[in-house]
Image (cartoon, coloured by chain):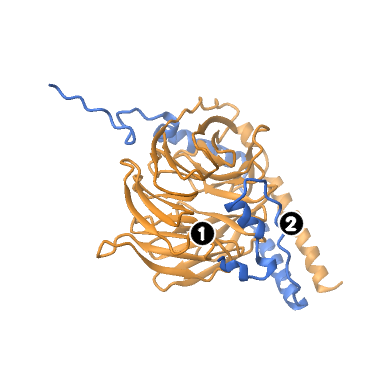
Amino acid sequence: MFSSLLLPAHCRPKNRYHSIFFSKKKKDKIVLKTPRMSSSSNLATMKKAVQQLRFEASINRVKVSQAAVDLQQFCLQNALQDPLLTGVSSSTNPFRPQKVCSFL
Amino acid sequence: MGEMEQLRKEAESLKDQITAARKAVQDSTLQEAAAGITVVGRIQMKTRKTLRGHLAKIYAMHWSTDSKLCVSASQDGKLIVWDSVTTNKVNAIPLKSSWVMTCAYAPSGNLVACGGLDNMCSIYNLKGKDGNVKVMRELAAHTGYLSCCRFISDTEIITSSGDCTCILWDIETGTQKTVFAGHQGDCMSLAVAPDFKFFISGACDFTAKLWDIREGTCRQTFGGHESDVNAIGFFPNGNAVITGSDDATCKLFDLRADQELITYQDSSIMCGVTSLAPSLSGRLILAGYDDFNVNIWDMLKAERVGVLAGHDNRVSCIGVSADGMACCTGSWDSFLKIWN
């Protein structure tokens, strides 16, 4: 049925399927256990992780005050063009066509 | 000291460096910056349309860029393309596998895609010559379920999977262009930046990652959530990311400041966030929860300013149309609702 059942146990997120499709209960925390790897591949993985962290540490960061002001500016500048924020009158609402009156 | 131990130490030191660098630019908070702004008035939206036709839980929906058509995917094994204004079904596409978890509409309107427990992303051509909708490609390579997919164009699509990776595909050849590996848990959702240069992914390792599509690299990683990140979206100008998690909160991360700016939470909300979408200006964040409701948040003030109540089961997906005119919610109760 599910092709993923053919996966090795450590790759099979059993609880994930259950909770997504069948259950309303709070999911258990999924812990993906890494399989026993050779020491050389462990080393390679670790090297990659360190390389990635070096890269992420090196980026330029903008001050929070500046970032916050820019987000705010964007919101305010576009507020009037945001129909869900301003509300949509029935005459301009494509989902609420006005009843057409005809003169008899 | 062994090489492994050395690397471990270096990793810890780099993590501390990143924390310090983030703190160094934390000269204020979003709350302080927005202190002078009034909270948005109560937002009251009504259901304008109900799209009826699916026979089982709806797992995903996506608007077409024309703001009229949308596609939905359901456990009944169908992809339905709807005209949201007339509520007519434009296409009802039967799927090979009914265990579908995601669907997407190409920006051109020519293609739709879906995938799920079959570990594949199936691309359908809506504009075939003889008028029939057929499978155009089946993109297979993931070793886990397909949780989300988004088109870059008619020739490229990005998928996220339970195998902890995301993949950029060449649709013409059906091959993988780039594999984005790095998450330590199932990737649950993805969103493409407005400029199509980056995408973000949320995963069960409680983090969100920003990826450079062309370089194939992860540029930034955002932690802070205490459980799986189920939903993710870009702030409309592409400079911030909004995440929704099983920890019952949504968070806003600024990409340029490289950190979390604010958390959207309330002590009365104790269930997970399943989906989210920002409004056109980004001022409102609409988030779907396990308790059948959608909460509307004032993005700057982190206050709840509205609720969309109308579904009889979990809200599994939400989307705001490109012109910002309406919000569409899809639910396990098998209905889609259009609100504004």
Residue positioned 81% across, 63% down in the render = B9
Question: Which residue corresponds to the image point at 45% horizontal and 59% vertical from the top-left?
Answer: B114
B307 relative to A82 in the view: left or right: right
- Image spot of residue B234 (x, y percent): 52, 48
What colour has chain A? Answer: blue
The relative height of residue A15 versus residue B310 in the rendered view (above or below) is below
Q: Which mark is residue B15?
A: 2
Q: Which callout, 2 or 1, points at the residue further toward the start of the chain?
A: 2
Question: B151 or B22: which is nearer to us?
Answer: B151
In the rendered image, which residue does mark 1 sit on? B99
Q: Is residue B2 above or below residue B134?
A: below
x and y, in percent, of residue B132 in the image: 29, 62
Image quarter (top left, top right, bottom left or bottom right) of the C terminus of chain B: top left
Chain that is coloured orange in the picture: B
Give the residue type at disc 2: Lys
Mark 2 to mark 1: distance in Å?
39 Å
Asked if residue B92 lies left or right of residue B318, the reply is left
Mark 1 surroundings: few (<14), some (14-19) or many (≥20) residues within 10 A = many
